[in-house]
Image: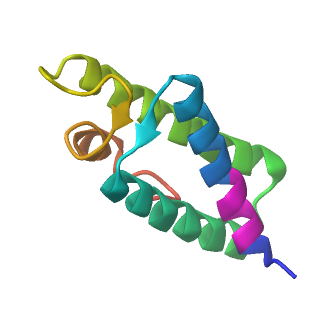
Amino acid sequence: MASAAGSIADYLFDAAAGHVHAMGRHFGDGADARLHEMTAQAGHILTAEGASDAEIDKARDALIALLDHAAMLARDLPDYPDDLLGERSFFPALSWFCPRHPFC
């Protein structure tokens, strides 16, 4: 049986992955691993806080903002693959994003 924290983490990660897929992009290995860590942490924190569905959706919306920012950065990088969110786009976007509850 899946834990509540794991279910929230899966929901957040799946929403992020779906958003990136809809952009026509995919995560690089490092971004994928970091996003899994972030959503797992968020799942544990939100569960411990007894977060409402609205609070979980607010966390999802924050992730979408992070990914949109990473995509914006990627568009401005010379010779950056059109289908990638990775080291040169995702991680600089984290500098803009963090600290943001419950992810970092």
- Please identify the quarter of the rendering in which residue 68 is found: top left
Q: Is residue 73 left or right of residue 102?
A: left
Residue 8 lies within the magenta run: yes
Between 10 and 55, the one nearer to me in the picture: 10
Question: What colouring style does the render use?
Answer: rainbow
Q: Is residue 20 above or below residue 59?
A: above
Q: Could you say where residue 3 lies in the image, as x and y percent from the top left? A: 79, 78
Residue at 76 percent of width and 66 percent of height: 7
In the rendered picture of this protein, how many numbered marks are placed on residues? Answer: 0
Q: Is residue 86 above or below residue 46?
A: above
Res. 104 visible in picture: no
Query: Given the current orientation, which residue lies at the most extreme right position?
Result: 1
**Magenta stretch: dominant SS?**
helix
Quadrant into which the C terminus falls: bottom left
Residue 70 lies within the magenta run: no
Residue at 32 percent of width and 58 percent of height: 30
Q: Is residue 3 above or below residue 21?
A: below
Q: Is residue 77 above or below residue 53?
A: above
The span shown in magenta is 6-11
Res. 4 visible in picture: yes
Query: Given the current orientation, which residue lies at the most extreme bottom position?
Result: 1
Residue at 81 percent of width and 55 percent of height: 52
Quadrant into which the N terminus falls: bottom right
Q: Could you say where residue 14 lies in the image, as x and y percent from the top left? A: 66, 48
Q: Could you say where residue 33 lies in the image, as x and y percent from the top left? A: 41, 63
Q: Could you say where residue 44 lies in the image, as x and y percent from the top left? A: 63, 74
Between 8 and 36, the one nearer to me in the picture: 36
Q: Is residue 101 left or right of residue 71?
A: right
Residue at 72 percent of width and 61 percent of height: 8
Q: Is residue 32 left or right of residue 90?
A: right
